[in-house]
Image (spheres, helix red, strand yellow):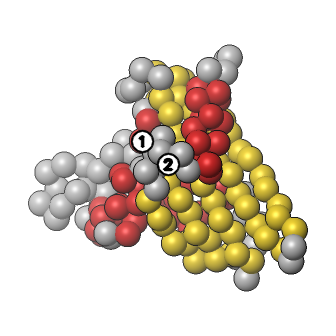
Amino acid sequence: MDEIVIYTDGACLGNPDGPGGYGAVLICKIGDKEHKKELSGGFNKTTNNRMELMAVIVALEALKRPCNVTLYSDSKYIVDAINLGWVMKWKRNSWYKDAKKKEKAKNVDLWIRLLKAMENHNVKFEWVKGHAGNWGNELCDKLASSAALGEDLPIDVREE
């Protein structure tokens, strides 16, 4: 399987419900050559967490065949939800945070899409401190922030 490194970031100007954007950089090394792909997009009336999730989703959905992926994100929300098993617990609880079903998990539509995007890949999530000089994170932040400033952004339709 190909070895892929992905950096992701999301941004929202006026969180929540402001315009937002996501950015992702995919890197694949084949022999001595490095192939890099940048992805970005934006939505209106969104949140930072939704854009963080969209960055990861869009990056994984761009992969054409099963890959070993190391994915770097500055979102503790995403990294902890995956690495600490929160998202699988939410799924088992019919998308409630606990079995008592008192509080619904947020962004369920995107978590479902993310789990589907991960199915064919071995994905390792790594947290990276944001705005701390990591070149991949800084590039994704620029892509996301620029996308959030785009014109005629579609409304982020949330299915909670």
Label 1 near label 2: C-beta < 8 Å?
A: yes
- State the separation of the CA atoms marked 2 and 1: 6 Å
Q: Nearer the viewer, residue 101 or 70?
A: 70
Q: Going 74% across and 77% down the picture, which residue do you hit?
A: 2
Q: Residues within 10 Å of mark 2 (few under 14, many from 20)?
A: many
Image coords of residue 121 (percent x, y): 62, 75
On screen, residue 109 above or below 143: below
Would you say 63 lies left or right of 10 here? right
Q: Nearer the viewer, residue 51 or 131?
A: 131
Using the rendered view, name the quadrant where residue 4 is placed: bottom right
The amino acid pointed to by label 1 is Asn
Using the rendered view, name the quadrant where residue 148 is placed: top right
Q: Going 60% across and 54% down the picture, which residue do you hit?
A: 7
Residue at the disc numbered 1: 49
On screen, residue 84 above or below 158: below
Q: Going 41% across and 55% down the picture, which residue do you hit?
A: 78
Image coords of residue 69 (percent x, y): 62, 71
Q: Helix, strand, or loop for circle 1?
A: helix
Residue at the disc numbered 2: 53
The amino acid pointed to by label 2 is Leu
